[in-house]
Amino acid sequence: MPRRTEIERLYDEHAPSLFAFLLNFTRDENDTRDLLQELFVKIAREPAILDNIENERAFLIRLAHNRAIDLIRRRDTRERTRENFAAEQVSLFAPAGDPDVKLFREELAQALGELPEDQRAVVHLKLWEGMTFDMIAGALEISPNTAASRYRYGLDKLRERLRPLYTEITNAES
Amino acid sequence: MSDELKQFEKLLESHPLRPVPAEWRKEILAAAEKAQPAHGRQPIPVRSLPGLLRSLFWPHPVAWGGLAAIWIFIFAAHLSMRDEMPVMAEKVLPPSPQVVMELKQQQHLYAELIGVNDSSDTDRPKPFIPKPRSERANIVSV
């Protein structure tokens, strides 16, 4: 088996996380693919950008986030509103066999799409990347307090939005 | 954070995210490999100096000629101005009487300070020469 190149290693280690983050942020699979490719092309062109980087994941998420923001700004100029993104059905979660779980995942994906982008990014990194607020702050270039407050607002909104389903699940479990 | 919120957090975390489509790996890595600086690129051939100059100037010879003429004109104008500079220096006016007076005063002061009495004849007090009595009488009467 041939030895993995550095770019392959980076892809295998970070592409799944970057993909999920970009998909949740852009709500568009084609845009996600373009951004992911742009990102790896940039790394291939300028491998030195990763020199002296302590946390590769946080750094790559920062690059991805900046590019996604640029893309969304360009998209906004094409008169596409956030409501349109939220209305789009994006399969953010792994497919589920259980219809209740499937329904919950669909509703959760929809609810995440309804959050403002800055809250959605923090919620995603905290819940599915397991990052601390300090790490999130570094990745998104905000203060840890801002990251914490955005997370709290985002989580509250999700809970309110998913309360009927969530209550049903907790009742069924008990 | 309340227990309910923590429980809700755990519920959300338990739902795994979709994996990146497998077919993307090959495509993205192929694009990245193409973009690598030292891969699959022909080195730039070293051209001879005349060839390089020809490729540089050939597309717009009139424009380059015009530019060269402007530069020659600027150079000539610069040279002619430099020739006139000594003439201008020669035409400098002599110092005014006030300046001369000022210089003399400074010179005098300097001489006093160092204790040398080298003041000129014009500055030296005139020796008293008694005039004839008749003249002195005139002065008194006036």
Image (cartoon, coloured by chain):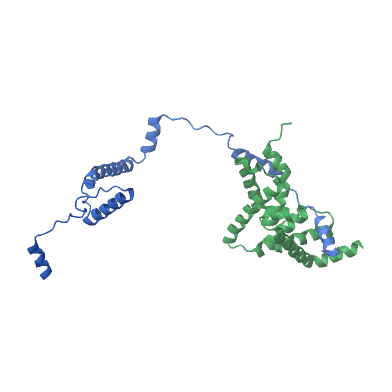
Chain colours: A green, B blue
Tell which residue pokes out farthest to the right in this image. Answer: A174
Tell which residue pokes out farthest to the left in this image. Answer: B134
Relative to B17, A43 lies left or right:
left
Q: Which residue is at 33% across, 48% downward?
A: B114
Quadrant for the C terminus of chain B in the image: bottom left
**Could you say where residue A114 lies in the image, as x and y percent from the top left?**
71, 64
Residue A148 appears in view: yes
Tell which residue pokes out farthest to the front in this image. Answer: B133
**Could you say where residue A61 lies in the image, as x and y percent from the top left?**
68, 50
Q: Establish if A4 lies above or below B99.
A: above
Q: Nearer the viewer, residue A140 or A4?
A: A140
Q: Which residue is at 59% across, 59% downward?
A: A73
Q: Establish if B139 lies above or below A62.
A: below
Q: Which residue is at 79% across, 65% downward?
A: A159
**Could you say where residue B113 lies in the image, as x and y percent from the top left?**
33, 50
- How many marks do you count on the picture? 0
Q: Nearer the viewer, residue B36 or A102?
A: B36
Residue A110 appears in view: no
**Could you say where residue B89 lies in the image, as x and y percent from the top left?**
24, 46
Q: Nearer the viewer, residue B115 or B50?
A: B115
Relative to B98, A95 lies left or right:
right
Quadrant for the N terminus of chain B in the image: bottom right
